[in-house]
Image (tube, rainbow, N blue to C red):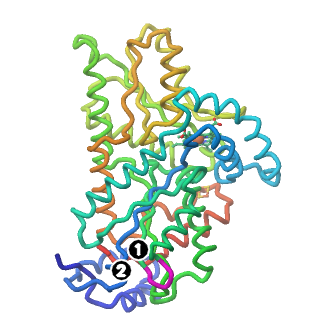
Amino acid sequence: MASMTLRLPTAQLCKAARSSSFRPSFRCAQQQMRWLATPTTHPVTQKNVGTAMVFLNMGGPSTLDEVGDFLSRLFADADLIPLGRLQNYLGPLISKRRTPKIQKQYGAIGGGSPIRKWSEYQCEEMCKILDQISPETAPHKPYVAFRYANPLTEEMYKKLLADGFGNGKGGRAVAFTQYPQYSCSTTGSSLNELWKWRQRLEGKAGPSEDGKDGTIRWSVIDRWPIHPGLVEAFARNIEEKLAEYPEERRKDVVLLFSAHSLPMSVVNRGDPYPQEIGATVQAVMQRLNFSNPYRLCYQSQVGPQPWLGPQTQTSVEEYIHKGQKDLVLIPIAFTSDHIETLYELDQEVIGESGHPDTVKRVESLNGNPVFIKALADLAKEHLDSGLACSHQNSLRCPGCKSERCAASKKFFAGQEIIPGH
Ligand SMILES: C=CC1=C(C)c2cc3[nH]c(cc4nc(cc5[nH]c(cc1n2)c(C)c5CCC(=O)O)C(CCC(=O)O)=C4C)c(C)c3C=C
Ligand code: FES
Ligand SMILES: [Fe+2]
């Protein structure tokens, strides 16, 4: 199939778009000019190298021996746990103290987190579908970049370069966050880390005026809280779980959506996560035709400071106390199993509820084909859009004081992307 590009040379388009009259709406101008698209051939270098699809996530320790390193990277991350000037001193101290407790939890779920297995599987399967539905950007090559566990962002970036992306040859890479809802402590942290390694490994200069300096062109799928495929996958899993209850009780089962909580300091800084979590919940309930009563609650608080509530475990206990024993827990902020589903929800919340036969959890998305097709559809929409990132991604939190956020947001928003390439 013939590939598509813009009739005007990109450099000319970009120059026009950068001129003062275009400046306020560069991305709009880029989008509006897409109707000029006409079939032509790929630049050879791009065709050969294909498109790198890079899944971003926090990662988890695959073995008990990796728990210490995982936690020490996590407590060293100032985007997640800001400890100020004491970060380098307190981070290692807290992580070391916490390691035995968390090792026990990973021990109880089989000796490690399944997140690497699921991420690699989901990304590979998505790429196979993309090769079919988006031949103009094929071949799609799967990569995983974790923030706190192997494969780390540095390792992924070096692999990209070794595989022929960058190195004077250009090539396109899509950073695809696997957190459907954006938080500066999760996706924001992963993007800041990706930007850091891009600066270290591909130079500080950034792309030249014509975008042809041979560095990797990055675009970002930074959030997808209400993507119809995601909503459909969640909704079907909920329907399956509801079908396990006797018909006469089914419509009164309470659906308890559960998301990882955020410290109130992060919420009050203006983090978009609570709003986007609410949007997913609303979209799923709309798809279910509001078949059941529902609530959103939050889990996995760490440390003594105030976190966003209500807490999942307390909510379950309180509903049971009120006589509501039919409860379905729905982990809504993570797309594969991890200690928060397998340990915290299954073993603590359900295990300690006293009613494990009526308090249930829906399956995580893991290898669900409906979900993997959704990932592919979402990626295709992004590749066709020509957008470097969402418009929303360019806005910092009102309370953000981080220079890292400012620099990385500017970098990603400034990438020049040709639709369908
Ligand atoms: C959408 C998901 C998550 C958000 C938002 C999030 C914010 C957040 N987390 C911490 C502190 C910790 N999180 C830890 C583990 C952990 N966190 C998430 C997801 C989100 N975190 C997951 C899936 C996991 C488990 C990984 C796995 O099992 O594979 C931990 C380590 C465990 C522990 O010590 O309890 C900490 C610490 C903060 C401070 C925060 C928001 C600022
Ligand atoms: S903390 Fe949200 S943009 Fe920096
Ligand atoms: Fe967390």
**Mark earlier in primary sequence (1, 2):** 2
Asked if residue 252 is positioned above or below residue 202 in the image, the reply reads above
Quadrant in the rendering for residue 197: bottom right
Residue 385 in sight: yes
- Pointer 1 residue: 172
Q: Amino acid at mark 2?
A: Gln
- Identify the mark at residue 396; answer none if there is no mark: none
Where is residue 293? Give x, y as percent. Answer: 35, 23
User: Mark 1 touching mark 2, by CB under 8 A?
Assistant: yes
- 24 or 191: nearer the eye? 191
- Pointer 2 residue: 46
Q: Residue at x 25, y 73 (%)?
A: 136
Q: Amino acid at mark 1?
A: Arg
Asked if residue 161 is positioned above or below residue 116 in the image, the reply reads below
Q: Residue at x 23, y 81 (%)?
A: 37
Secondary structure state at the residue bearing disc 1: strand
On the rendered image, what quadrant is the C terminus found in?
bottom left
Q: Residue at x 52, y 63 (%)?
A: 156
Where is residue 359? Give x, y as percent. Answer: 41, 17
What secondary structure is the magenta-colored segment mainly?
A: loop
Q: Residues within 10 Å of mark 2 (few under 14, many from 20)?
A: some
Farthest left residue in view: 1
State the extent of the magenta-drawn residues as a range: 166-170
